[in-house]
Image (cartoon, helix red, strand yellow):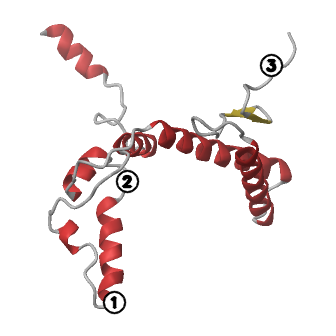
């Protein structure tokens, strides 16, 4: 068979097919698709100005737009909640790949310059953080987690011999 058309509401760039960016319940995706195409063109231009070839720039732009679309889809799928209050430690447990402590320390350092205390209570353990979409934060954290497996990913044959002799 011939080439397969991308699903409705999605866009194909080279060998990539980007998921649709329309939020659930959106009847007309025209503006979202136009915005995504403008973002893609912007990324291509940035990469070309940075010294990439046109083909490399197009590939990098397609990857960036794909990631942006995936993040948007995750955010749209995550249920909104505003009941639970989190401490910084609990937020780090929820989405540990995100640099929460560094972020809130940076905010506090900036506020200190102006004589204010913006996030000091967060840094001292108060439960004042209300993540409105915890599932989104979990998915984002998992996607960003680049830590190696606990065993370093090495396949240790000695362990197999020990197990066999037990």
Mark 2: few, some, or many residues within 10 Å (few <14, many ≥20)? some
Secondary element at image label 1: helix
Q: Residue at x 61, y 42 (%)?
A: 69
Q: Is residue 40 above or below residue 11?
A: below
Q: Of the numbered discs in the image, which one, if any, rests on residue 4?
A: 3
> Residue farthest to the left?
166
Between 54 and 131, the one lying in front of the other is 131
Mark 2 or 3: the one toward you: 3
User: Where is residue 92 shown, x and y percent of the image?
Assistant: 26, 52
Mark 1 or 2: the one toward you: 1
User: Where is residue 39 shown, x and y percent of the image?
Assistant: 72, 54
Answer with mark 1 or mark 2, whichever residue precedes in sequence.
Answer: 2
Q: Of the numbered discs in the image, which one, if any, rests on residue 73?
A: none
Which residue lies under the disc numbered 1? 113
Which residue lies under the disc numbered 2? 98
How far separated are the C-alphas under marks 1 and 2? 25 Å
Between 164 and 62, the one lying in front of the other is 62
Image quadrant for the C terminus?
top left
Answer with mark 3 or mark 1, whichever residue precedes in sequence.
Answer: 3
Q: Residue at x 59, y 39 (%)?
A: 23
Secondary element at image label 2: loop
How far separated are the C-alphas under marks 3 and 1? 57 Å
User: Where is residue 107 shown, x and y percent of the image?
Assistant: 35, 74
Q: Determine the image quadrant of residue 29.
A: top right
How far separated are the C-alphas under marks 2 and 3? 38 Å
Answer with mark 2 or mark 3, whichever residue precedes in sequence.
Answer: 3
């Amino acid at each position: 068979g011939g080439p397969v058309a991308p699903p409705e509401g999605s866009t194909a760039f080279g060998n990539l097919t980007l998921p649709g960016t329309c939020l659930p319940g959106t009847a007309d995706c025209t503006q979202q698709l136009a915005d995504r195409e403008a973002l893609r063109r912007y990324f291509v231009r940035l990469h070309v100005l940075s010294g990439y070839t046109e083909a490399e720039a197009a590939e990098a732009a397609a990857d960036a737009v794909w990631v942006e679309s995936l993040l948007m889809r995750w955010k749209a799928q995550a249920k909104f909640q505003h009941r639970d209050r989190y401490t910084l430690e609990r937020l780090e447990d929820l989405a540990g790949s995100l640099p929460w402590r560094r972020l809130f320390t940076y905010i506090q350092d900036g506020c200190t310059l102006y004589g204010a205390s913006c996030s000091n209570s967060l840094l001292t353990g108060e439960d004042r953080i209300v993540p409105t979409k915890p599932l989104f934060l979990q998915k984002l954290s998992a996607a960003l987690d680049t830590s190696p497996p606990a065993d370093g990913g090495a396949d240790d044959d000695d362990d197999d011999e020990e197990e066999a002799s037990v």
